[in-house]
Image (cartoon, rainbow, N blue to C red):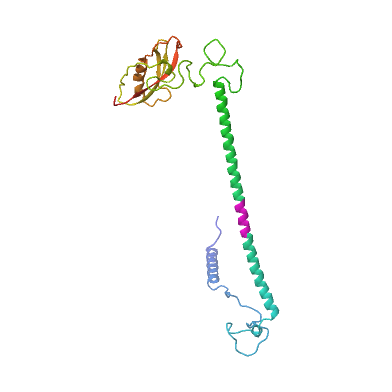
Amino acid sequence: MKFFKTKHEEHSALITLLLMFILVFLVFIVGLKYLDPPEEYGVAINFGVSEKGQGTLQPKMSKFQPKELDEPPSENQQLITQNSKNNEVNQEKLLVTDQAKAIAINKEKIKKATEKLRLEKEAERLKHDLKLRQEKKKNLDQLIGGIANNNSNSLGEGNDNMLGDKGQLNGDPYAPSYFGEAGLGKGGNGYGLKGRGQPTKKIFTPDCDEEGIVVVEIEVNKNGNVSNASPGKKGTTGPLCLYDAARKTAMTYKWPANDKAPSKQIGFVIINFSVTQ
């Protein structure tokens, strides 16, 4: 659909557009002008520092002094100024004093809190130690038959069919043997076998080039022979390669026969292996 029917209409439209473009261009180029800053309206007032004056020359600010400032201050003004200064000094002193008091109070509070915490920790430690001692005493009483808490003859320990606590007064409540002399054996006797006399033995050399101590639990019969040996008990410091030689050595132990000895007496022997052997 055509907007213009004749060529005259097309020419008129082109001329109109051209004139509008020129008009817009002139508005941006020529346009309306404004003042920056804009003009001020009203009455201009002369600069001064007092309500009254005389002469035609404008004085400089640094040299001009109002007449009222040349007069010395009165006694009342001096007193007011001095009192104001004294009040400021007193307020500063009070502020410093208050700060010192606050610091001292805080230090005292911190000291008391620290002492309270120390006492609480000490009380907790003593309570814990007391609890451990009570538990240790309770366990010991249970192991030795409750003698410490009960004097009844119905309590006891032993391998006989009679009432009583079998053992010796200077013995060890944890010892497995009821036979022999009190104390721990030294050298070749071993633990729990001191009353059996001096044993004979044969030393086996381990397959490895290591050294250390091996504790062996043994079972000894009335004839003094070792019927069973278990190496590696508490107190062992040697490696595993020493266990077999230690067991073989423990099996060679031979104590003197004793008819009063139990049929199976449990004890321990210590075998020390050294690379210099």
* Residue 93 appears anywhere in the view: yes
Image position of 84 (left or right of 223): right
Residue 255 point in image, percent of width and height: 38, 14
Magenta residue span: 99-108
Q: Is residue 231 above or below residue 45?
A: above
Q: Is residue 120 magenta?
A: no
Q: Position of residue 71 (x, y in %)?
A: 66, 84
Report the label total.
0
The residue lying at 61 percent from left, 53 percent from top is 106
Residue located 58% across and 36% down the image? 126
Question: Looking at the image, is 42 positioned above or below residue 115?
Answer: below
Q: Residue 124: x, y in percent?
A: 59, 37
Helix, strand or loop: magenta stretch: helix
Residue 50 occupies which quadrant of the picture?
bottom right
Between residues 135 and 31, which one lies in front from this camera angle? 135
Note whether 109 is above or below 204 in the view shown. below
Quarter of the figure with residue 94: bottom right
Tell me where residue 81 appears, x and y as whole percent: 66, 75
Question: The C terminus is located in which quarter?
Answer: top left
Left or right: 145 as drawn, with respect to 219: right
Taking the spot 34% from the left edge, 22% from the top edge, the residue there is: 242
Residue farthest to the bottom?
55
Image quarter in which the N terminus is found: bottom right
Relative depth, front residue between 244 and 149:
149
- Frontmost residue, 235 versus 23: 235
- Asked whether residue 193 is in view, the answer is no
Q: Is residue 100 magenta?
A: yes
Q: Residue furthest left?
A: 276
